């Protein structure tokens, strides 16, 4: 009998998944690759990409949409939105409690049934804001 129904988790894939979790803040494939390489020196970037796409397909991780050119990966599977720093690119999770999807019907989306909320707020993170302040003072 074939075990095709059983989810196969190779050692590589487990390490890739754990790396996404340990990196925490929405790493890109390259950031994941750099970290995985410390544990599996022979691994290639394309192998990391392949494992990431399988993990996404299995629902173990998500890709974050709307963050520019590069794909970021997210191990937080709960419904949430993101805020991204336009200077360093850092991405943080924000809760969606303040969004009421039903308000779409009274704000220009009459008749729509909302199924998903994908919101990315762009701004400056506290670290970059502090750095900018310091630079201003030093100038
Ligand atoms: Zn920043
Ligand atoms: Zn997230």
Image (spheres, rainbow, N blue to C red):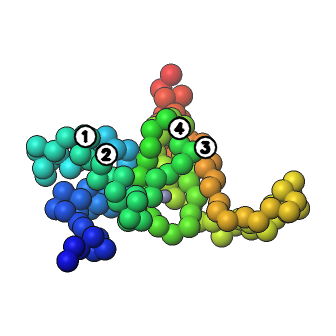
Q: Earlier in the sequence, mark 4 or mark 1?
A: 1
- For the residue pair 94 and 115, the one nearer the viewer reads as 115
Q: Secondary structure at mark 1?
A: helix
Q: Secondary structure at mark 4?
A: loop
Q: Which residue is mark 4?
A: 68
Vertical position of residue 7 compared to residue 125: above or below: below
Q: Which residue is mark 2?
A: 49
| Foreground disc of the pair 2, 4 | 2
Image position of 31 (left or right of 135) = left
- For the residue pair 40 and 124, the one nearer the viewer reads as 40
Q: Which residue is mark 1?
A: 45
Cα gap from disc 3 to disc 4, whole angstroms: 11 Å
Mark 4 burial class by Cα count in 10 Å: few <14, some 14-19, many 20+: few
Cα gap from disc 4 to disc 1, whole angstroms: 20 Å
Q: Earlier in the sequence, mark 1 or mark 3?
A: 1
Cα gap from disc 2 to disc 4, whole angstroms: 18 Å
Residue drawn 18% across the image and 57% down it: 12
| Foreground disc of the pair 2, 3 | 2
Mark 2 and mark 3 residues within 8 Å of each other at the beta carbon: no
Mark 4 and mark 1 residues within 8 Å of each other at the beta carbon: no
Q: Earlier in the sequence, mark 2 or mark 3?
A: 2
């Amino acid at each position: 009998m074939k075990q095709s129904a059983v989810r196969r988790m190779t050692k590589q894939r487990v390490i890739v998944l754990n790396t996404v979790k340990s990196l925490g803040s929405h790493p890109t494939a390259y950031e994941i690759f750099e970290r995985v390489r410390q544990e599996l020196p022979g691994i290639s970037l394309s192998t990391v990409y392949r494992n990431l796409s399988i993990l996404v397909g299995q629902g173990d991780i998500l890709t974050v949409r709307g963050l520019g050119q590069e794909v970021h990966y997210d191990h937080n599977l709960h419904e949430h939105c993101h805020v991204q720093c336009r200077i360093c690119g850092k991405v943080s999770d924000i809760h969606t409690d303040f969004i009421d999807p039903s308000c779409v019907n009274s704000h220009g989306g009459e008749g729509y049934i909302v199924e998903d909320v994908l919101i990315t707020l762009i701004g400056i993170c506290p670290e970059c804001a502090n750095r900018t302040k310091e630079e201003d003072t030093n100038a």
